[in-house]
Structures are given as structure tokens and as C-alpha cells.
């Protein structure tokens, strides 16, 4: 005898619920990773700006030394 159509539908709904839970978990993980990458990017940009400022200061001092007799 064929399986009850309601049981088939129930099984498919259960599969969809499981898939939704899995996707929600994956989505939360990806959002957390994205937030971490954004923080890391911001920190790296800040470090880059600080390094640029220090290099420019060193270059300015070197230029000043060259101009001093």
C-alpha cells in the first residue's frame, strides 16, 4: 500500500525545517565571520595609516637633514 500523502508531506516539511535550521546556523556563522573580517580590515587600515604617518615623518626629517649645510 502507498504511503499516506500526509506522512509524505510531513516528512518533506520536517526536511525543510531541518534545512532552515541549518541555513540559519550557517547564516549566523557567516555574519560573525564577516564582522570579524570587517574589524580586522578596519584595524589594518588604521595600522597602515599610522605606518604611513611615521614613514612620512622620517622622510621629512631626512629631507630637513639634506637641506642643512
Image (spheres, rainbow, N blue to C red):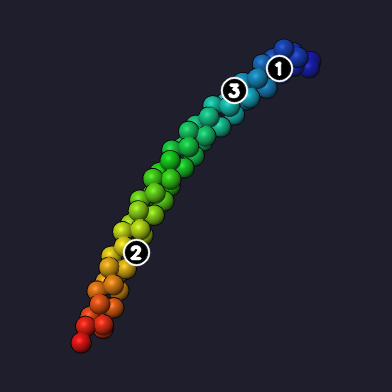
Q: Is residue 20 above or below residue 49?
A: above
Q: Which of marks 2 and 1 is in front?
A: 2
Estimate the x, y position of residue 23 in percent, counting from the top left.
Answer: 56, 32
Q: Which of marks 3 and 2 is in front?
A: 2
Give the labeled residue for mark 3: 17
Q: Which of marks 3 and 2 is nearer the N terminus?
A: 3
Q: In this view, does 27 lie above or below 56?
A: above
From this viewpoint, is residue 33 visible? no
- Residue situated in front as seen by the camera: 56 or 69: 69
Give the labeled residue for mark 2: 52
Residue visible at 34% across and 64% down? 52
Q: Disc 2 versus disc 1: distance between alpha carbons?
A: 63 Å
Q: Do the residues labelled 1 and 3 touch (CB within 8 Å)?
A: no
Estimate the x, y position of residue 53 in percent, counting from the top left.
Answer: 31, 62
* Element on which disc 3 rests: helix
Estimate the x, y position of residue 30 in percent, counting from the top left.
Answer: 49, 39
Quarter of the image with the C terminus is bottom left
- Taking the view exactly as shown, the residue that stands out farthest to the right is 1
- Residue situated in front as seen by the camera: 53 or 28: 53
Residue visible at 71% across and 17% down? 9
Q: In this view, does 7 lie above or below 53?
A: above
Q: Do the residues labelled 2 and 1 touch (CB within 8 Å)?
A: no
- Taking the view exactly as shown, the residue that stands out farthest to the bottom is 69
Q: Is residue 56 above or below residue 19?
A: below
Q: In which quarter of the image is residue 68?
A: bottom left
Give the labeled residue for mark 1: 9
In the image, is 11 to the left or to the right of 1?
left
Amino acid at each position: 500500500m502507498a504511503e499516506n500523502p500526509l506522512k509524505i508531506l510531513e516528512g518533506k516539511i520536517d526536511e525543510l525545517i531541518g534545512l532552515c535550521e541549518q541555513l540559519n546556523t550557517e547564516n549566523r556563522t557567516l555574519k560573525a565571520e564577516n564582522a570579524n573580517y570587517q574589524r580586522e580590515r578596519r584595524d589594518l587600515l588604521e595600522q597602515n595609516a599610522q605606518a604611513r604617518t611615521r614613514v612620512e615623518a622620517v622622510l621629512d626629517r631626512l629631507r630637513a637633514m639634506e637641506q642643512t649645510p
